[in-house]
Amino acid sequence: MKFGGTSVQDTAAFTRVVKIVESQKAISPVVVTSAMSKVTDALLDAFETAKKGDSKTALQLLKPHFARHLQVSQNLTAEKQQKSFQAELNLAKDELSDLLLRVKRRSLPLAMLKDAIVSYGEQLSSRLLADVCRAKKLNTRQIDARRLIVTDDEYGAATPVWEETENLIKLELEPLIESSEIPVLGGFIAASRSGETTTLGRGGSDYSAALVAAALRARELQIWTDVTGVLTCDPRICSEARTINTLSYEEASELAYFGAKVLHPKTIQPAVDYKIPVRVGNTFEPEKTGTMVLAESEVLPGKIKSIAHKTGITILRISSARMLGSYGFMSALFQIFERYRTVIDVISTSEVSVSMTLDNTSSLEPIVGELKRLGNVEIEPENAVVCVVGEGLRGTSGVASKIFSTISDINISLISHGASSVNMTFVVKEDKAGEVIKRLHGTFFRQI
Ligand code: ADP
Ligand code: ASP
Ligand code: MG
């Protein structure tokens, strides 16, 4: 059971979570929690402030968040637990103060310090949740996720080393589960082989929970959040978004990858590997089933299930007469991206040109420098990828024409269809994305 930031944002939220865990205690849950909402952002702000040389202000930025934790502890646990939590909090403050000073003085690599700092969100929320559950007579025990999830040392977006992680999770958690204890661990945080704290990327608690579920061959992975399942589109764009009853793993992966924030993009793979059903539910409406993600789901011929989108996308176009009838060009091109560890999301080629989209542009300059050796390069920032998903797209005619006639007056700069048979992906200008989604949602999901 994974609870997101808004599900542990305050006393009322903690109370809801305890009820949900309590209702499933007979079926041996393992609880994974995010940091309390806004805490990860605050820790990152503190890091940036210290980086600019002001480590004192950096620590001040965190004070209100320490107080939020303390408030929950005071509202929901007994005096003894409050004291011990306060001691834990004081320790965290001292450690953070030291880490922020190190950031200012650059006394350790910044990427390493950043992960160490940001990990306190989950370290504290998991301790607090374990305390609050115990106060409500649940047999919980806080476990440090950094002892279970082993990763490489790519700080900020580390990759787990599966066999080691699997063994550690089993070794540590199975005996607890057998003795009816409920482990509570922080998501998102892990450690490299050398023991340094790492993180799995923003929103990575979903992924932590999926790793734990896979290692334990759990009966179900539950992602508890602030919306009732995966919706037909981002509810912040279109308030008519509705819950989707079932999704296939493939559909859910595409949606997560192309921006449906409700699931971290890497969450589905561990579930696929061991065929674990994933349920996405709402802590504010726990009685509703939400969305089930399964190996196979309803195929609705000609129907789409959801529309995801991702903004902040840059298009790169490389045109070169050298491409014509030659081999090795694509290989040379991809090697450049590999060297700079940069992911290409969507790609489309013609005989003399390649267009592709990038989400991460941190290495754009050197990449473009090298691409120029292959041909003429154009860069187009501020785009959005829109991804229409549904098993029903598999071999049904007419869907593409319906999509494109709905937005016929909006310029589309790239289209990809067929690589995965469950999606149709295209790129529009960022400032048109909201309009595109609203219109498509109107066309495909209008209530009759
Ligand atoms: P948590 O903190 O629980 O992990 P997130 O903020 O990461 O929650 O993800 C849930 C949010 O994802 C929702 O509140 C919603 O605004 C956003 N979202 C974007 N696209 C979708 C979608 N297709 N279905 C559901 N939620 C979506
Ligand atoms: N707390 C982390 C974040 O805000 C991880 C998560 O919530 O899943 O990105
Ligand atoms: Mg999330």
Image (cartoon, grey):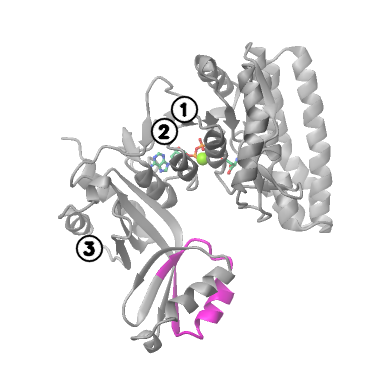
- Corner quadrant of residue 41: top right
Residue drawn at (25%, 50%) of the image: 440
The residue lying toward the viewer, choosing from 20 and 441, is: 20
Q: Is residue 289 above or below residue 19?
A: below
Q: Residues within 10 Å of mark 2 (few under 14, many from 20)?
A: many
Q: Is residue 133 left or right of residue 417?
A: right
The residue pinned by badge 2 equals 277
Q: Where is residue 331 in the image (x, y as percent from the top left)?
A: 46, 76
Q: In which quarter of the image is the C terminus?
A: top left
Determine the secondary structure under disc 2. Answer: loop
Q: Which of marks 1 and 2 is nearer the N terminus?
A: 1
Q: Residue furthest toward the bottom?
A: 321
Q: How crowded is mark 1: few (under 14 residues within 10 Å), some or many (20 or more)?
A: some
Estimate the spatial distance between the alpha carbons at disc 1 and disc 2, rounded to whole Å.
7 Å
Residue 68 appears in the figure: no
Ligand 2's quadrant: top right
Q: Earlier in the sequence, mark 3 or mark 2?
A: 2
Q: Is residue 99 magenta?
A: no
Q: Earlier in the sequence, mark 1 or mark 3?
A: 1
Q: Three-letter amino acid code at disc 2? A: Pro
The residue pinned by badge 3 equals 409
Determine the secondary structure under disc 1. Answer: loop
Q: In this view, does 442 lie to the left or right of 217?
A: left
Q: Position of residue 229 (x, y in %)?
A: 39, 33
CB under 8 Å between discs 1 and 2: yes
The residue pinned by badge 1 equals 219
Q: Three-letter amino acid code at disc 1? A: Arg
Magenta extent: 356-381
